[in-house]
Amino acid sequence: MVYAIFMLLVLLTLAAGWRGHILELPLFLVTVAWVLVHLVLDMTDPLTLSF
Amino acid sequence: MTRLYLAAATLNVWVLVLVLTAAFAVQLILGELPCPLCVMQRIALMLVALGPLHILLRARHDTLTARDAAVGNGIAILAALLGLTASGRQVLLHILPGDPGYGAPVLGLHLYTWCLVAFGCQIAASAVMLLATKWLDEKPVDWRATRVTTLAFAAIVAANLLSVIAEAGLNWDLPPDPVRYLLFG
């Protein structure tokens, strides 16, 4: 479900860009930051086995 | 020059759409479901595409300026660095001799290795686009490909969204080695 949320954020950022909304860049940065945190947690959690 | 710049940005988005479509084709035709890291790389590709799309959408609203181009290329580079982290991680997980890797190789390389190459190429392309802002003439241009390009990108993201919901079911995270769509039992 978390990956679906990331993709929804991508679509939201696209919609903001389409309308020239000021939130386009903040939405993108929040998405990148959250994806990075998720990636780092995946890499550092000994119980997670990423293929 | 602005028309050439917008053409390059349009081509950039379509290449990323094709890469995402190819990954989807591998998933549907070969039946190889994407693992969590694979999905992260797909998300990184989507985030990269937001960069050239920003350039196209700014040109749609107003005259494309060097500032808009810089923001768009910055978005692409930042997302590509994220993608390099995910794909680099997956390459290193399977780097030991004798490791078969994850999934079937395509044209001799695994998909995560192709992703690593793609993200590297994207950074190089964005660097060239940044240099090219020197020749932007900042005049309004009627660029008709923006709408269809944006729709194509939105469609592939939506398709991936439905796919990942089917794969994860009601779980927060994906299983490490997915073999079936959990939403369908």
Image (cartoon, rainbow, N blue to C red):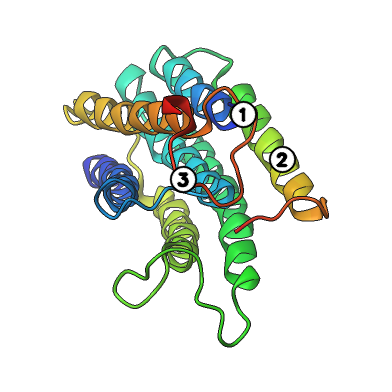
Identify the residue under disc 2.
Answer: A38
How far across and down, in percent of the image, does residue A26 sit? 64, 23
Is residue A23 found left or right of A42 in the rendered image?
left
Amino acid type for the residue under numbered disc 3: Arg
At mark 1, the secondary structure is helix
Along the viewing direction, whichever of A1 and B70 lies nearer the viewer: A1
* Residue shown at the point (50%, 40%) measured from the top left: B43
Residue B42's disc number = 3
Q: Is residue B14 above or below residue B122?
A: above
* Residue shown at the point (51%, 35%) measured from the top left: B67
Contact, CB < 8 Å: mark 2 with mark 1? Answer: yes
Amino acid type for the residue under numbered disc 2: His
Identify the residue under disc 1.
Answer: A2
- Look at discs 3 and 1 and give the one toward the viewer: 1
- 3 and 1 marks on the same chain: no
How far across and down, in percent of the image, does residue B132 sit? 39, 54
- 3 and 2 marks on the same chain: no
How far across and down, in percent of the image, does residue A42 sit? 73, 48
**Distance (Cα) linking label 3 and label 2:** 14 Å
Which is more N-terminal, label 1 or label 2? 1
